[in-house]
Amino acid sequence: MAAREVTQGWIPAFAGMTRGFGKGLPKGEGVGRGLRALRAAVQRLRATWSPGYAVAAAVAALFVLGFLPFVKMGLVVNGFVLGAIIATGAIGLTLIYGNLNFANIAHGDYMAMGAYVAFFVVTDLLAAVGIQGQGFGPFTFGYPLLIALPLAAAAVALGAVVLDVVVYRRLRNRQVNAVVMAMASLGLAIAVRGLIQIIWTGEKLQLPRESRQVYHLPMDIRIPPDSIFIAGLAVVLVVGVYVLLTRTKIGKAMRATADNPDLARVTGIPTERVIWATWAIGGGLAAIAGVLLAVFQAQLLPSMGWEFLIPLFAAVILGGIGNPYGALVGALVIGVSMEVSTQWITPSYKHAVAFIIMIVLLLARPRGLLGRSN
Amino acid sequence: MAGIYAVFALGLNVHWGYTGLFNIGIAGFFALGAYTAALLTSPAADPLLFEEFVFAGDWAQLGILDLGIDLWFVLALAAAGAACGVVALLIGYVTLRLNDDYLAIATLGIAESVRLFFLNEKWVANGSKGLYQIPQFLEGWLPSDKYNYLYMVVVIVVLAVLFALVQRVMKSPWGRVLRAIREDEVATAASGKNVFSFKLQAFVLGAVIMGVGGALFAHHIRFVSPLTFDPLLGTFIIWAMLMVGGSGNNLGAILGAFVVWGLWVGARFLPGELADPNFRFFMVGVLIVAVILLRPGGILGELRRVTRGRAGRSAVRLDDG
């Protein structure tokens, strides 16, 4: 519970920060709806401002502030970093969910695949060409990883599109139930993980470490430079997705398809190409999230993706399915909760914490934190 | 072993084959059933064997209920089913009102939470070392080298009872409603059925069957640990069994369990790379996708029953799952 208190204080702050974000959007468009809902909620709160609310807000604020001294700030910071990784995966997942209308259970394994491809590029491919891992600034990884990141993203994006053509498109043409699509993605999840195990065995692998530096910040926060890199890259990617969705033609087409596929087709939007774009973006983001997770955990395991599904879906569901901004908020809530919970609970319960938060929030708000009532 | 897996395939058939509930956390119910049975029948914890394990599971020897170990076995089967039923009731109550996909995620969450619970709470079940020396049913009736035959009979009897039960239930009006929900939820609701309640009942029934399967497993292997219930052998392979055999067909579920388990064990004797467990893992996934793409009905598709006036029932093969 404590975790929720901590993050709740933060959401209104986010609302304030992003209020300018949705402004440019015309009314009635799919994206930005979450933000507008948030803005509307804030405005409603202002309109109905009364002493009662003030007291409630003050009590809540005191509660959060009262809790803060007991929460290790290092855990909160770590939570934001973990949240950034979850967000990178969850945004792709929610886009696929919104556009193709099924839960891609293979998403976690796409992440793992991305991590393993990057690992292969760093330790085998680049080493074979003669590029050796050298220290790259203060980070634990050498600059080969920077080359590996886009390669892994491209490989997984391509793989996701190919799998769509081979498997999902046929099912779409047969107009099967969404659950059958999810079923097929379960099969693919198993196959992808099996493939990873065939190529790289089931053993734990470690990315080469070039440095062991740690920054010490006030309030007893210790943060490895990697975390800053992870958070920074995630921010860049989120902004990139935002620009893509709101400013580019394919992004707008994606939103239109998510809103109403039939109408989009009638309007002349090539929905198949839009679906491929969705897979490519979702797969690429998943691969990067996988690499970041491998850096964060300092190891690779074939099961890392499957186990990461719970936080991923928790973030997607918290944010409301198909809503990338919701997924971002959900991911940060889940990430911080998972990390902060380790202060009181055995760290290995992390994933269960994500699950329980999801269940509790589903009970309270079945459409997610930013869900629209409808 | 195949018989035990057939029990799971039956349970999954109730979820997916008949009601269209997407359960990807079979391993959770598997583990819960197995642990419940193991804890109820295990002898008192030997401090030499179990360091932090305090649960004295010697109910049979406590003398409170002096039923003898064999009756406890039957009781353990029932308790394992009950435990899974309760968990399914709780989770189903929260998630079944919502979109289908939420249930899938929730079952995944259960599987992970159950595994973490038994892994971390050493006092309950000895953590990662697991429980061993679980007693067997009717131990000592036959010499130990022939015991497996006896247990096979036990498994087949349980399987037959469950098969008859599920068959009967699915032919009843209640089963018809479930199939109707699978095909079209809105239409079913419109004809005055409480969709949520029916789904919840089906979810609990399937989970109970899985719990019984877990208990059978625990007494067969005589050892349970959190690692026994990994997603592959606890969930994925059961899905492959149901898909191969034919979802919506109980005989198909059982057939699929035997076929897939046969392939799984048989592949061990293949030459070279093909015997690699990782390769088999990969093939389980490919098998599921292939069945969905090429033969959605599985080997034995669902028989579509149509009541046609006086002509009575005629069976038509249903070809799209």
Image: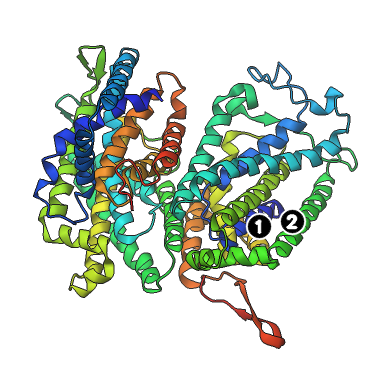
- Please tell me the numbered disc located at residue B162: 2
Q: In which quarter of the image is the N terminus of chain A?
A: top left
Q: Where is residue A55 in the image (x, y as percent from the top left)?
A: 29, 21
Who's the residue at 74% across and 59% down the image?
Answer: B165
Cα gap from disc 1 to disc 2, whole angstroms: 8 Å
Label 1: element kind: helix
Q: Are marks 1 and 2 in contact (CB under 8 Å)?
A: yes
- Could you say which quadrant of the image residue B120 lies in? top right
Q: Nearer the viewer, residue B191 or A154?
A: B191
Which residue is denoted by mark 1 in the rendering?
B10
Disc 2 sits on a residue from what chain?
B
* Residue A46 in sight in this render: yes
Q: Position of residue A223 (x, y in %)?
A: 24, 20
Q: Where is residue B8 in the image (x, y as percent from the top left)?
A: 64, 52
- For the residues tagged 1 and 2, is the chain the same? yes
Who's the residue at 66% across and 63% down the image?
Answer: B174
* Residue A88 in sight in this render: no
Q: Nearer the viewer, residue B294 or A91?
A: A91
Disc 1 sits on a residue from what chain?
B
Q: In this view, does A17 lie above or below A196?
A: above
Q: In this view, does B189 lie above or below A331?
A: below
Q: Label 2 neighbourhood size at 10 Å, few (<14), some (14-19), many (20+)?
A: some
Q: Which of A369 and A188 is in front in this view?
A: A369
Amino acid carrying mark 2 in the image? Leu
Q: Which of the marked residues, 1 or 2, is nearer the chain's N terminus?
A: 1
Q: Which of B315 and A36 is in front in this view?
A: A36
Amino acid carrying mark 1 in the image? Leu
- Could you say which quadrant of the image residue A339 lies in? top left
